[in-house]
Amino acid sequence: MSTITIKAFAEQIGIEPERLVKQLGDAGVAGKSVEDSLRDEEKRQLLEFLRGGTAAASAAPAGRGKITLKKKTNSEIQQTTKTGMARTVQVQTKRRRTFVKREVLEQEEAERQEADRLRQQTEKAEAEQQRLAAEAEAEQARIAEEAKREEAEKAAEAERVAAEQAAAEAAQAAAKLASEKAAEAETEVAKVAEVEKVVEAKTQTVSKAEPSADEPKAATEPAKPSAAEPKKVAAEKPAPAKVEAPKEQPKPRREVAMPSIIRKASERKRVSPIIKQAEPKPVVAPVATENKAGKGKGKRKPFAGREELHVAGGRRRQKGGKRRPSNIKSSVSDQHAFERPVAPVVRDVQIGETISVSDLAAQMSIKAAEVVKALFKMGTMVTINHTLDQDTAMLVVEEMGHNPVESRQSDPEAFLSANLAVEVDESTYEPRCPVVTVMGHVDHGKTSLLDYIRKARVTDGEAGGITQHIGAYQVQTSNGQITFLDTPGHEAFGAMRARGAQATDLIILVVAADDGVKPQTIEAIKHAKSANVPIIVAINKMDKDSADPDRVKQELANQDVIPESWGGDVMMIPVSAHTGLGVEELLESVAVQSELLELKARPSGNASGLVVEARLDKGRGAVCTVLVQHGILKYGDIVLVGQETGRIRAMVDDAGNTIKEAGPSKPVEIQGMSGVPAAGDEMIVVDDERKAREAAEFRHHKDRESRLARQQAAKLENMFSQMGEGEVKNVNVLIKGDVQGSIEALSESLNKLSTDDVKVSVVHGMVGAINESDVNLAMASSAVIIGFNVRADAQARKLAEQEDVQIRYYSIIYEVIDDVKAAMEGLLDPEIREDVMGHVEVREVFKAPKIGTIAGCYVTEGVVKRNAHVRIVRDSVVIFEGTIDSLRRFKDDVSEVKMGTECGIGVVNYSDIKVGDQLEIFEKTEVKVTL
Ligand SMILES: Nc1nc2c(ncn2[C@@H]2O[C@H](COP(=O)(O)OP(=O)(O)OP(=O)(O)O)[C@@H](O)[C@H]2O)c(=O)[nH]1
């Protein structure tokens, strides 16, 4: 029986406990307090009381919690019938209203919400369950998949093992066959021996039937086990054991067992002699005979026919060139067959600054024709051998779905440095002989001195004393060998230096004792100093009475070349090229000086060197004299010389002997170049002809670019404008003028322009036309050439144009000063630029009464235009400047005359034209200089 306190019950049913006590009292359960307990019957009593209580208020606490009110209303409706009689209708309206207790509603709402919450929770739980189930399913599938894959791998492994076993079996079969054959052969031999013995026995009429029958048995017996053994092993042992089996074979048979399906032909060749050796000598012949009989051909190897079957792949490989072993199919096993790729293969294609179409195709593993086609579609027509620039190559690679990788790897220069990497280790270098250049003023005796040395040293041992002129030669002295560069000293030296090459270790400066220091002597000193090459002075013509060596020394000292005897560092040796006086001492000095220089070179490996001179020979093509500087130059080497390549087809030394090799400091003349390189160009031997060609092309390209860059840098206006950016602090000027006085005045004025920030230095100043040597010097020292009332000769003009050395012509000193000053201050604008368009030679002069003087001319260069500006140059000096008045060809007035044709030229206000005058035709344009 359950009891509950009134208070608790009141709480349960949601009314005040006091009210409940009162109600209980009303129901007959009296004397109860709030804390008293309530029994079940008391509860029932209360319930009954409440039910039987007020009819209207049926709101028992445990009931439905609602009250329904019913209401009846009676009313009458007055109506008129059809017949017109009045009628009254009684109407009763019943209304019922239900009031529901608020707590009940709230409870219901709470229940509903609870139910909703529960439902949502249930739904969530279900979803989670489903997700977990799905995951579990996926995991299961993955595991299953993995298991499947593993199974497949196992199967593949098993197949592989099976294949190997098959191969081993095949090999064993071969071994067995070989041994069978060997056995057969031996049997055969035995039979032959038997027959022979029988015959012998018969002829000797001695009854030896017994031993002759036994002997073959003995001979065949050792062979039998070798034939039977592998057979037995193959039959009895399970597959893996068979792989081991060949080890148990005797040596020759193991050699046979080894060839797998990919055995090389060379290996096969190796096998046969071993077998031949292993077998008793007489066996060979019968086997060969048997083979001949059995196969009808191939009398060579006992099992050559069978072996072919196994090495089919190897054969194909030989034929097809570089086929990878994985592509080789064998008749024994097909398990290693080619598998078609399932997705497109995207390759990384390394592209250097240039790449050939064929290389590009090779890297993408496609045919070159495909690349050509793709390029064609992109609007570029190329051939397989074409070299593409990096940008184009990148585009085409992308177009073809591969991944272009910009790389320096295929940069030909990078390749070349890799090619030369061997020479880095200088500790392996060995001493080499010095390379000497002889320089000096005209007629001071350079040739005579060299001739004396050469005759005395070289031609002595040669029949007739004929030496080949190759621009350089070696002489043997008591102090070792010396290599002389026998080129027109200044030009060659200048040209080499202008290219950054340094062939010479020493300069012998020849100064005539009777003539002293002259312009070219000074030029040579400047060259030597700027190249930092030591000088040895040979004071020549000492046999002459007028010889004055002290004067020479004094003059040299004025040029900052101080003799040792005066406390300086320059050796000065008095010599005579005629008498040979002092020549020995001179050579000794060379030896001493070169010892101080510690000249060393790499004694082996690919050669590198310099071009001393080069020319185009009608019969022999490009011929060049190179000075080997490192390594050994060999006949047949592939060389890269400047922008030319080739294979050495002929090599001769200075004595005209054909040689096969040349080491360091040796001058040789080589043939085989694709073109004529320039003096001073570097020569290197490369291993790969194609790479050499690529590098040559690359250099050509680079050269063009750097020329363009130089064009900008070497101009006076740019030089000064760069100065503003703090790049140029030195402005070098080379002056050539008509008289010494103006050169001195100009040099002095220009030197005075130097400030703390900018130094103007005159690198060279001399009287005379601007020549090639000046251009080279200007190139080497990044100088601007100023021609003061003088002009450049044709070669110099050509070289200056080629190398973009700026030549500016002036005739008034203060204009030069003004230009340089203005440029220094950054005010060099606008500039009137003169573009020379042609050169004309005056060959005849006519005087026409009405027209004036007409020069009959020949256009040697460029064109002549009517109304163009003209300068009249006589003996390299400008004598007049004006404009062209008339231009005629035969009797017609023309507007233009081209190179190689004759014409008549009249100059405005000038009639003193003479035969031999040069006319420089030019245009003036105003150029705004941007700084
Ligand atoms: N007396 C004398 N005459 C010499 C000597 N050396 C050279 N000569 C003469 O000087 C002249 C010029 O000599 P070269 O050897 O041609 O002078 P170079 O410097 O080679 O001249 P270029 O090739 O024109 O630059 C010749 O007539 C020689 O005979 C010498 O030691 N003594």
Image (tube, rainbow, N blue to C red):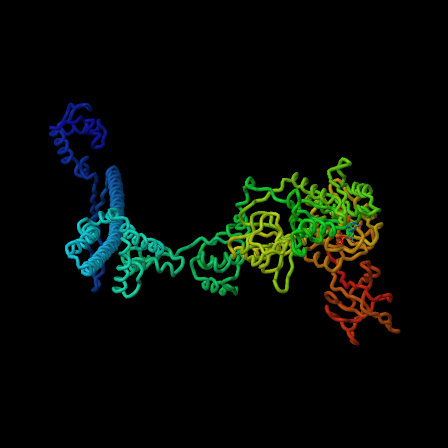
Q: Residue 696: x and y, percent? A: 57, 56
Q: Quadrant of residue 694?
A: bottom right
Q: Is residue 663 visible?
A: yes
11 or 398: nearer the viewer: 398
Image check: 910 left or right of 755? right
Instruction: Say if 229 sits above or below 11 in the image.
Output: below
* x 17%, y 59%: residue: 205
Image check: 271 left or right of 408? left
Q: Quadrant of the N terminus?
A: top left
Q: Farthest residue toward the right? A: 849
Q: Is residue 156 visible?
A: no
829 or 57: nearer the viewer: 829
Image check: 224 left or right of 827? left
Q: Residue 69: x and y, percent? A: 21, 43
Q: Residue 821: x and y, percent? A: 78, 48
224 or 909: nearer the viewer: 224
Q: Farthest residue toward the bottom? A: 891
378 or 495: nearer the viewer: 495
Q: Quadrant of residue 19?
A: top left
Q: Residue 456: x and y, percent? A: 70, 49
Count the marks.
Answer: 0
Image check: 29 left or right of 329? left
